[in-house]
């Protein structure tokens, strides 16, 4: 092959290689753009669905505590049923509600630290067990739904649910007895002494709604 022929061949081959590389680059760019556009649509659809869905829980959890391990809400919290939970009421726990998580059987208290995922639904459950304006079974189911919404693991969730389902009747009955004797559980005034105990505070009727 002559020098001119070789030069022409190399130039032609080079141009072909450049053309192939450019084509691959363009195709990869198009594919990347398509993937990015598809991902953007997925994110947009997810955000749209999230914004339109029923909001199950409302209100950041703010707790105060007596010297003994008894807590009270500083702000109200709310649970709302989803569309597929027909027959379940919206539950709002008022600021000042006193909770000791006693609606959960004592064997499970170690699973319910005040700063755990379960605290919010446990307070809802305590409130429903105290007020008793729903059935016990409904209150137990709301605890289960609340734990699902907070991402509690299925093993722990099922253990706690079965615990209240089978062992919560004693707490239900005790709350009824305490209400009938005049005990209150919604504070009108909050203690400002960190040494104040619940047992002392609850003896003053003016501290309650």
Image (cartoon, rainbow, N blue to C red):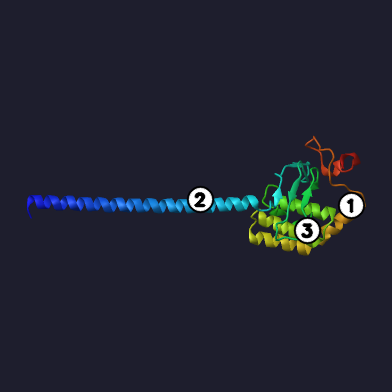
Disc 2 is placed on an element classified as helix
Image quarter of the C terminus: top right
Mark 3 → mark 2, Cα distance in angstroms:
40 Å
Residue furthest toward the right?
A: 181
Tag 1, which secondary structure? helix
Identify residue for label 1: 179
From the image, tell me which residue sits under label 3: 139
Residue 199: image location, x then y, percent: 85, 44
95 over 106 or under it: above or below: above
Name the residue furthest top: 192
Local SS, label 3: helix
- In which quadrant of the rendered view does residue 139 lie? bottom right
The mark nearer the N terminus, 3 or 2, is: 2
Give the x, y percent position of residue 56.
70, 52
The answer to whether 3 appears left or right of 165 in the picture is left
**Disc ID at residue 115:** none
């Amino acid at each position: 092959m002559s020098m001119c022929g070789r030069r022409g061949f190399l130039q032609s081959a080079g141009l072909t290689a450049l053309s192939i590389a450019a084509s691959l680059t363009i195709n990869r760019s198009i594919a990347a753009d398509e993937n990015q556009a598809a991902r953007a649509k997925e994110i947009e659809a997810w955000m749209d669905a999230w914004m339109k869905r029923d909001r199950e829980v409302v209100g950041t959890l703010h707790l105060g505590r007596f010297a003994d391990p008894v807590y009270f809400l500083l702000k109200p919290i709310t649970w709302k049923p989803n569309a597929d939970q027909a027959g379940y009421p919206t539950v709002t726990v008022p600021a000042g509600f006193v909770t000791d998580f006693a609606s959960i059987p004592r064997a499970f208290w170690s699973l319910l630290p005040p700063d755990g995922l379960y605290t919010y639904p446990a307070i809802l459950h305590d409130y429903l067990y105290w007020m008793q304006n729903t059935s016990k079974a409904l209150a137990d189911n709301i605890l289960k739904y609340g734990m699902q919404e907070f991402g509690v693991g299925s093993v722990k969730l099922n253990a706690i649910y079965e615990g209240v389902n089978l062992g919560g009747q004693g707490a239900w009955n005790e709350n009824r007895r305490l209400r009938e004797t005049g005990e209150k559980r919604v504070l009108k005034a909050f203690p400002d002494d960190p040494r104040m105990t619940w047992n002392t505070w609850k003896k003053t009727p003016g501290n309650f709604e």
